[in-house]
Image (cartoon, helix red, strand yellow):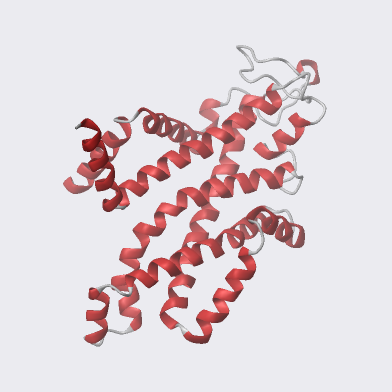
Amino acid sequence: MKKILGYISNTCWGLASKPLRFFGLIIIALLGVMILFPELLANHDPFEHDLGIRLRSPNLSYYFGTDGLGRDVFSRVVFGARISILLGLGTSILATVFGSFIGTISVYHGGKLDFVLQRLVDSFLGFPFLLLALIMVISIGTTIVAITIAITVSLTPQVIRITRVLVLSIISEPYVEAAESLGATRFRIIIKHIFPNLIPQVSVYVAGLFGAAVVGETTLSFLGLGLPPPSPSWGRMLLDGIGDYSEVAPWILGFPAIALGLLVYCTALFGDYVQEVMNPKLRNIKVRNLQSEKI
């Protein structure tokens, strides 16, 4: 317990010691509140519309103004965060799990299986991520399950390729060769030696995948292929704002775009910090650079 508390304390201090990281931590914590308790932040029903107050500019009652149907934009941004973040987090974790497993099996089995899997990965990587997700959503539908499958499948080939490179470097380590010489089975080597060393390195990429997944869901909603209305999706709000109201009510477009940009930016900051924590070599390089600058 003391080690866990000490690690949490060092992590918080490392975040707080740098203003940008601390800012990112605050935004991520706020987004966490949006996911768990959106009712605490939203001051109006995101689905309730009143044509009598349509296109109201931001004020004390409607912080981000109202849209063309008289719905509170702030409340819809708050509730829309739950959809975008949960879907982005779920798809990035699924892609990491499946990609790590397939990449490890591909390397360790080798032979024809590795050749076939890597050619499949090459064929998927030949499509841009958003284009592949778009094709899959058009093919299988626009439900939440279909969108999750489309984004997960579109991200998994990237994880497979990254995992393959990492596993190739891990299996050349002396401790893996020692385990093989002692007669350890492949399953035991994968579980006991490869996965414990692979997971910290692959987890660094989850932040990048999360940002890509959120942008992917927002793009699909913007193109009209996301969750159907009246779901308060950020992409749907961007679509509404860029249409007939971009000049008379720019807040309909501006605030969801700012929320999306902050989420992706803060996730990148957090991912950079996780990479520094998980990679001691990178941390030592940064420390030496700081010491040389002081000298």
Q: Position of residue 208 (x, y in %)?
A: 49, 49
Q: Position of residue 56 (x, y in %)?
A: 73, 15
> In which image quadrant can residue 186 be found?
bottom left
Residue at horizontal 76%, vertical 32%?
A: 240
Residue 229, compared with residue 108, is above or below; it is: above
* Residue 77 vs residue 277, the one in the foreground: 277
For residue 291, side relative to residue 129 (left or right): left
For residue 88, side relative to residue 32 (left or right): right
Q: Position of residue 249 (x, y in %)?
A: 74, 20
Most distant residue in the right direction: 244
Residue 221, compared with residue 115, is above or below; it is: above
Most distant residue in the top direction: 60
Most distant residue in the left direction: 2
Residue at horizontal 67%, vertical 19%?
A: 65
Residue 30, compared with residue 190, is above or below; it is: above
Count numbered badges in the picture: 0
> In which image quadrant can residue 19 be found?
top left
Q: Position of residue 244 (x, y in %)?
A: 82, 27
Q: Quadrant of the C terminus?
A: top left
Residue at horizontal 31%, vertical 75%?
A: 172
Residue 29, compared with residue 153, is above or below; it is: above
For residue 34, side relative to residue 68 (left or right): left
> In which image quadrant can residue 75 be found?
top right
